[in-house]
Image (tube, helix red, strand yellow):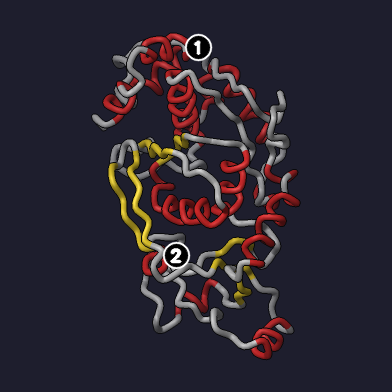
Amino acid sequence: MGNLRTALLAWLFARSHNGRFVLRIEDLDRPRVRPGATEQMIDDLRWLGLDWDEGPDCGGPHVPYTQSERLDIYQHYLRTLEKAGLVYPCYCSRAEIAHAASAPQQGAGDGPVYPGTCRYLTAKQRSEKARMRRPSLRLRVPDDATITFTDQLAGTITQNVQQEVGDFILCRSDGIFAYQFAVVVDDGLMRINQIVRGDDLLSSTARQILLFQLLGFPIPKFAHVPLIRDASGKRLSKRDRSMGLGPLRAEGATAEEVVGLLAAGCHLVETGSNVAPDELAKRFRSDPYDIIRAISQE
């Protein structure tokens, strides 16, 4: 339900601004993709009454819209960064980084700040390490990479990417492109000018803006919306199937009831309202920033 609420809000942001809505399937981590998950997601969105102008089922000017079909594109932009001297191989495991004496306990990224262990290896040292382990590829983040941006909900954020994240991974050691890298390439090429997503990704934004800059893409606007949490304030897990759409549909809930439930959770309508997405979009078209003001009450 949390993913669906974020999708509804992203759709409302686009439609209330008379914008285009793009559906992209982010399935790079193939071993973790459940069979039928994409088809189920598309069915759920359609059932709720959400539509899109570009996507894997309807095409568009920036096909393909499924990340696992865009690997050659990512490889091209990775080579662009390599030619600029901004990429280097890293042979460190997660455990080694976590136990490095110079690594803080936790950074603004997905784990400890990377201490730069492999940044200055000689060609001989890299050759020796390559015999034992396949490397990941990291971005050589400039020391002065201080990024400041204004999120439409979180306000002004400043982050020194080198100090708070370190050199981050662009391509994993198993050959899978990192989320941070792939979404920037996609957003840049698909001309995305507004990104609406959960606030658990707010800490990723500075890294992505840095990549937008390095690759020469325009930087979009960002709005990070609150996640659905339980009574104790803990983020609901995707494993919590009781909060999925399936049980509600099985119990006979209508799409208008579910949209009303999702919209009421972020103060867009009164609790207990039944409303279709199109009706919501019409309410906010005269002043789209009412959406921001409503969500900000959370």
- Asked if one can make out residue 148 in the rendered structure from this viewpoint, the answer is yes
Q: Which residue is mark 2?
A: 111
Q: Is residue 183 above or below residue 45?
A: below
Q: Secondary structure at mark 2?
A: loop
Which amino acid, by three-letter code, is at mark 2?
Gly
At x 37%, y 36%, the residue is 225
Q: Residue 218, labelled with which disc?
A: none
Task: Give x and y (percent) for residue 224.
Answer: 38, 39
Of badges 1 and 2, the one in the foreground is 2
Name of the residue lying farthest toward the left: 297
Q: CA distance from mark 1 to mark 2?
A: 41 Å
Q: Is residue 109 above or below residue 183?
A: below
Horizontal arrangement in the rendering, residue 293 relative to residue 76 (left or right): left
Neighbor class of circle 1 (other Cα within 10 Å; few <14, some 14-19, many 20+) is some
C-beta proximity under 8 Å, tags 1 and 2: no
Q: Secondary structure at mark 1?
A: loop
At x 39%, y 20%, the residue is 261
Which amino acid, by three-letter code, is at mark 1?
Thr
Q: Which residue is mark 1?
A: 254
- State the residue in front, 122 or 295: 122
At x 62%, y 62%, the residue is 81
Neighbor class of circle 2 (other Cα within 10 Å; few <14, some 14-19, many 20+) is some
At x 38%, y 60%, the residue is 108
Task: Give x and y (percent) for residue 250.
Answer: 56, 19
Task: Give x and y (percent) for residue 298.
Answer: 26, 32
Horizontal arrangement in the rendering, residue 269 relative to residue 142 (left or right): left
